[in-house]
Image (cartoon, rainbow, N blue to C red):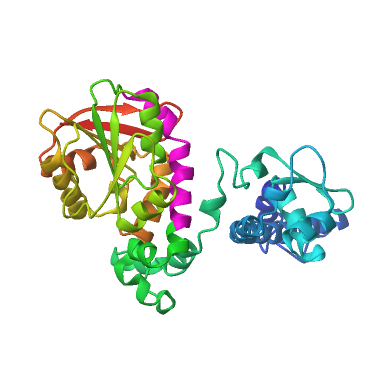
Amino acid sequence: MTLHKSTETAGMTGMNGSNGMTGTVGATGHADTACAETTDRIVEDYLTLVDDSMVAVLPHALRIAVELGIADMMNALTPQSVATTADLVGADPDALSRLLSALAAAGFFTGDPATGFRLTARGARLRRDHPHSLSASLVNAESQLAWLRAADSFRTGAASFGTGDEDGEAAAGGFFGVKDNRRAENLAFLRRMRERTGRLYRQAAETVDWSPSSVILDIGGADGFLLGGILSAAPHASGILFDRPTVIDEVNRRGGVPGCRTVPGDFFVAVPTGADTHLLCSVLHDWTDEQSVDILRSSRRALAPGGRLLVIEMLVPEDGSPHISRWSDLGMMVLTGGRERDRAGFTRILHAAGYQVSRVLEIPDSPFSVIEAH
């Protein structure tokens, strides 16, 4: 929004007299100017306040749209009446009209209450079947609850997730303990991971030379979407998908992953042997340095002689430049107590576990990199 029109005039107000809004301005024109400038400041302050409130409201509006399944019932070609959409998603027509109008102003829909609304390219990502869907990430109540208590994380340096009474006994095991005890949240988490890796696996598969790999072990590989994509690019290899028992149970319910065997377990204790390539994708950022070293030591003990470890993570720039990893770093601290790391940080924990970094590859068109270690 163009809210800065009155910035110059607001700055000039103080030059019209020692009081800013002075009553000693002799000419009527000067008084009118001072009044107009004061009005501009009031209006600008109000609009800024409104903009600030939108920052807080928009994520909730998007979450509601996803929970109702609004985008799933619409398309980008033909406007659909509010009444029809309300009937399809089971919503109050007036309330839905107001929600769609607000999200249209933010670019997720286009249209108006009289003629109906249709999806924009941005809004299409609210659909569950979109290849770059954001639906699971937006419906993330656990994250929102943790952020309500996030100031505690910055006071103590520890995760704020699971510190509230409303989380109950299921939060006793922290972020992942909740997933193990609440199937619905476990499934939602797996969907979010698929959204994350769905945008990554193709670039990763094309960036890495998989020809030396015979058996690929994906440690903490979630539902196997990433490993399945890699095996499609490397059909000569086989895979082992390793994750928490509750995750592997869900994978097996869906029929597993082609070319893979599934193994449940705890990577702090041990990981399966027999693989010459170990893969850790978006795992280490969930954990502290000490915990990450324990995971890496489990990998080191199980890796076949002459094998390699591939760590796929975002690298925080060491020069202070803007990067999405800086925001993700805050999320990791609040939710899990983990952190994003720069190259030196990864080198340090890998070395502590007995690994040596051999090279770092940037994944094109992605904020992620591949760290190869032996």
Q: Position of residue 77 (x, y in %)?
A: 78, 37
The residue at 67%/38% (across/down) is 121
Q: Position of residue 118 (x, y in %)?
A: 77, 44
Camera sees residue 241: yes
| Quadrant of the image containing the C terminus | top left
Query: Left or right: 125 with respect to 78?
Result: left
Q: Position of residue 117 (x, y in %)?
A: 80, 48
The residue at 16%/50% (across/down) is 270
Report which quarter residue 23 is drawn in: bottom right
The residue at 16%/55% (across/down) is 269
Camera sees residue 33: no
Query: Left or right: 85 with respect to 128?
Result: right
Write the start and end of the magenta stretch as one range.
187-208
Which is more toward the observer, 333 or 275? 275
Report which quarter residue 312 is drawn in: top left
Q: How many marks?
A: 0
Residue found at the far right of this picture: 114
